[in-house]
Every structure is written in structure tokens, then in C-alpha cells.
Image (tube, rainbow, N blue to C red):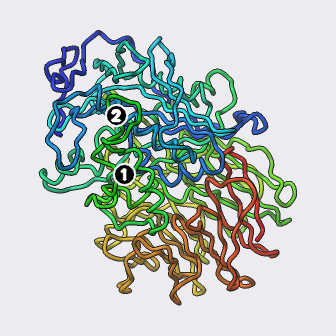
Amino acid sequence: MQPTPPRRRAVLAAALAATTAAAGCSVPEPRRATPTADPAPGKPIADARARRALLLQFSAHPDDDLYFMNPDTQRLLDAGVPLVSVYVTAGEHTGRNRIAGMPETPPDRAAYSAARHQGLRQSYAVALGLPVFTPWRRETLTLPGGRRAEVDTLTDGGRRIELVFLNLPMHTSRRYMALPALWDDRALELRTHLSAGSPVTRADTYDYDQLVGALVGLLARYRPTVVHTLDPDPDVQHGDDATRRRNSEQPGYSDHGDHTAVGCFTWAALCRWVSDAVRDGEPIPAFTAKAFRGYYNRHWPKNLPPAVLEEKAARLVPYGGDPSWQCGNPSGCGDYGVGGDRPLTNQKGWVRSTHHRWPGARPALAAGPDGRLTAYGVLGLRAVRWRESAPGVWSEPTDLGGGPLAPTLGSAVLADGRVLLFGVRFAALDGHGGANRREVVLLEQRSPGGPFLAWRGLGCPERQDDRGRRIGAPVAAVAPDGRVHLFVRNADKGVSTRVRAADGSWGPWRALPGPAEVQDGLAVSVDAAGRVHLYAAGRESVRHWVDGVEREDGLPLSGSTVASAGGELYHRAPASAALLGPDGDAGLDGYGDVAAARSAALGTVLLGTDTDGRVTVRSGGRLRTRTTGPDAVSTALHLGADGATVVGLGADGRPWSWRP
């Protein structure tokens, strides 16, 4: 699927004849200025009392959400959070709905698109616990500029799902990559497909600004509190061309080109939505964001245990459907090449993992002299602070600026109690062939419990912008000598570090030694001797550095991100629920991120999620499971004089506390 570069202001219909998606020319209107970084703090944030939780997710193709965003999506649905799922392309591909063991049928892109949309309706009906062929209300939604989209709605009591189809063209197997070209070229326009049986009966055209504007319009209409996107910055992935083509990956990167383009368009829309609010003096939209890896899942050990995998794969069965079904849709009852046991037998293994682009997006916690906690996180692409006024009673968020930021903040607390926050900033996200740049940034507290200094750029361990897009989530630790060790995964899938001296001066970026080949989701801790331990899940084993020197420990392979406390490692074997520690089974079965902390009074305390998505804590030989209270988008662990406290961020953007 090598892209065909478009000729600017030239008709591209010939290049797209195989897809019937007209790509046209026009003299573009003056380009709208791309939102720039706005680190200044103090902006108002949308009032939590006026917010209702809602999940809005953006996919390139019908099924991206099922393959890559579950089980996170299903967990929020089970908690009663309404869902709006947006599909940017029509999913028409070659127009052939392949049936195993049957001859190929003539291509019909309108029918194949309609069959995939029917499959989504079937899957999400089952996700709500309803019969697979439950009727949906299908309507036309008018977007900015008068463009139209189909919106399908299903309600069950207080629960609600809306599916929104924009129907732009997707890739073909050999020719033109429409959406990646639209991201790169301002002169290009793409014409939408008409899906058979849709209430939308007239095609529209989109250029770059119009697609961003449509996504901003959807954000403003639904005002989500949680946003799921695809990965805008996939890994560099070298390999032979035949393998890449067979696995539908773009040249040089571990994902489909449509996934990357839609991820970039979505993050550009999020940036514009927030910047428009700042420009107009409106409150910052209060949402959390997660980006999900796509075909990356093929390249690394699998991380979902059997029970979670079975549930995730089950959502693809009604999507795939079957040609014998009587669903009432004459164009087809699903994407027949996907249903049955095929998600589990597919050698690509996409369904067997769920990876976040920036793992570890949990609140950063610090305790004041009175023991009350302060939590830091990213809300509306900006750093925010919540404070406890009493145990478990949290303030409204205070804007600390710094945006637009990736979802994960690293943190460190200095010996005097001052907090350092580290983030990855979208320094530029221009499209049109413009700058696309990431940088590591620092927010340093001026005095313990007090205000902060201005945001400071710490640069990037990569010199080229495209490589800089591949950096991971920052983690940091304070050594007993007062030095702060900052670590990020780099474009070569190794680890880069920068060290802050006790006097506050920073050394240069340098790469840690060793052919690491590690995943993101680094874990750092300090042992009793004051040594800084860094662990990362590698392609063949967990990698381990002590004070910047790689150790050959003979560590096992991990399928998940790792955790560390007191210099010790906690991990899960591939496709396993069991959490393993230095003494074997740590007694915290589940999946997803794990947090570990150690104190003299409590020993090692572990925080995770069980296979049913419930928050669990292991402490003092006892396992405690949280069975009531608000849902959790993310959780963090703090050990204090009065025991362990879990602080979670709910789908409504509000923090909560649980003291097991």
C-alpha cells in the first residue's frame, strides 16, 4: 500500500478510480492557523457539577474500536457511561465481503460499507446486553459547513450508544492512501462514499480544515469527558516490504496509514477545541484522553489473559456476523471475514493485546505537611491540580497550563517536598506537510505546597522531528544524593535519560547502553542502598538498568508493562493474569497497568485491576477489591502514615479516594 503522492491542485480521480472516491482539486481557502502551545496557567475549567460522563471515540475504520480500544470501552459501557463512536472512513476497502470457502463476489463498495456498519450495530447491541438484531434509529446529522453524517442511536433504559459515520474513503490494497494524503496536502479534497441504505443520500467533500472542523464540531456537540483515539505517532518498524504489505502496515511504521492519519486529525481537533475555548474566554473542556496502539500489537508479546481476551474477542463475533443471518439488511449482516473464531485464529494477533500509546496515565500524588493529598493530572490537554480539603473530599481542578500535553505526567518529589512534573507536549501538530514535533517539558514547584515556576522545555532526546514523535511517557526518580533521574523511551525503542543535579542544573540527553528493544511503560524505583533501578518490558525479556548501567539478570519475558518498588520487579508473563514478583506469584491477578510502592510500615503495596475491571490492592498479605463507588479511568497509589490510599479519576473527570 505504497502511497501515491497527490499532485497539488490536480484532479486525482484517475488515481482513485479503483475506489470510486473522487479526490479533486480546488484553490484552497487561506489556511487556518494551527493552534500553538499555550503553557500559561490559570484558565477556567468546565464546572464538574455541570458535567455528565460521556465517552467519545474516533476510529479510522469500522472495527478499529473493537480490535484496539476494548476492553476499556466495554468497561465504561458496563459502568453506564454513554458512548459516541465516530468512524471517519466508510470501510469500503475493495468492496468484497469475503466468505470463507466461497468464491469471491463482484465488488460492491456501498454494500460492503453497509454490511460493516450493520456489524457494528450488532456488536454494540450485544455490548448493551440486547438481542443482536435490536433495531437502531438511523438519522442524518448535519456537521459544520452543512456536511452530513449518518448517526445510529440505540438506548436501553439510561444507557445510550450513538454510531457516527463520516464515510470518507479508506485505502485500497495497492494504490492511494487517501487520509494520509489529506493530512499532508492542503490542496486535496476527498469525496465521501454513499453507504447502501444510509439516510445520507448525497456525497460531500472534505479538505484538511473541513475534516478538522467536523471533528471539532462533534467534540463541541457531545462535550465528552473521556476521549479515545488511535495512535498518532506509531513506532518506527523496519522490515521487508512483502511482510509490511501482507500486514497492511505503512512503510516504516508499525500501523496502518489510515490509523495514523485519523489519530493525527483527532489530536489536531482536540488541540483546536481547547484553543478555541481559550481564545473565546470559555472554560477549558474537562476531558481525559487515551490513545491506543494499533497494529503495534502484532510486534510484541500479548498482554491480555484468557478471560479478558475471551470477552474482547466476543465483541467481534457479532460484528463479523454470518451470511446465513436474517438481520434485515439486504447488503449483508457483518464483515464476514472477521466473525466466528477468526479474531483468535488470525496470526496477526491484533485482538490479543490492548496497548496505550502513553501508558501510566494515572494521577501523580504528593502529601502535604498535614497529610492531605494533592493530585496532578492532565485534563483538557493541560496539567491540573486537585487538593484534598478533607480525606476523600477533593477541590475543583486548578489549571496549571502546559498544553497541549500527552495524557501521562511523570513526577518526582524533592527532599524538601517540592514537586516536579514532567510531560510530553505537542509542540507542533500542523499537518499540510508542516511541523509535527514533540518535546519533554517540566513544571517545577517554587516552594513546598506552593505555586509553580513557569513551564520549562527540556528538549527531546531525538534531533529529528519525526523521530521525536516516537518518544514515550516520562518517568522519574529522586536519588538520595538529590539528583533527579528522568527517563523516556526513544525512537530506537531504547531508553534515553537526562539527570538534574542537586543544584537544579540539567545534564544533556544520553541514551542508556544496551540493545534494549523495549516497550513503553517504564518503571523506576530506588532501593535501600540508594541505587536507581529502571525496568522495561523488552522484546525477549525484561531489561534492567541500575544507576544507568544495564544488568544481565536473566529476567523473564513480560507481556505487560512493568512495576517496581524498592528496586524489585513486578510483571506478568505474556497472556497471563498472574502478577509475578521477586518471590513468585504476587497475589494480584488481573490485567493492565500495575503500580507498586513501598514503605517501612506497610512493606510493598500493589495496585492493579482484576479481570473484571475492578480496582484491587495487595497489602500485608491481603487482597482488597473495590466493589462500589464511581468508575475509574485511571488510579494511583499513595502510602502514608495512616495506610494506603488509592486515588482514582472517574469518567466524569473528578477524583475519588479509596482507603482499603
Q: Which mark is residue 115?
A: 2
Q: Which mark is residue 470?
A: 1
Looking at the rendered structure, the kind of residue marked 1 is Arg
Horizontal and vertical percent position of residue 217: 53, 23
Considering only vertical position in the picture, is 415 above or below 556? above
Considering only vertical position in the picture, is 127 above or below 415? above
Give the SS element for disc 1: loop
Horizontal and vertical percent position of residue 220: 59, 26
Circle 2 Cα neighbour tier, 10 Å, few/some/many (<14 / 14–19 / ≥20) = many
* Residue nearest the viewer, comparing 589 with 601: 589
Q: Which mark is residue 481?
A: none
Task: Tell me the mark number nearer the camera, choosing from 2 and 1.
Answer: 2
* Residue nearest the viewer, comparing 302 with 230: 302
Give the SS element for disc 2: helix
Question: Which is nearer the N-term, disc 2 or disc 1?
Answer: 2
Residue at 36 percent across and 19 percent down: it is 206
Residue lying farthest to the bottom in this orientation: 583
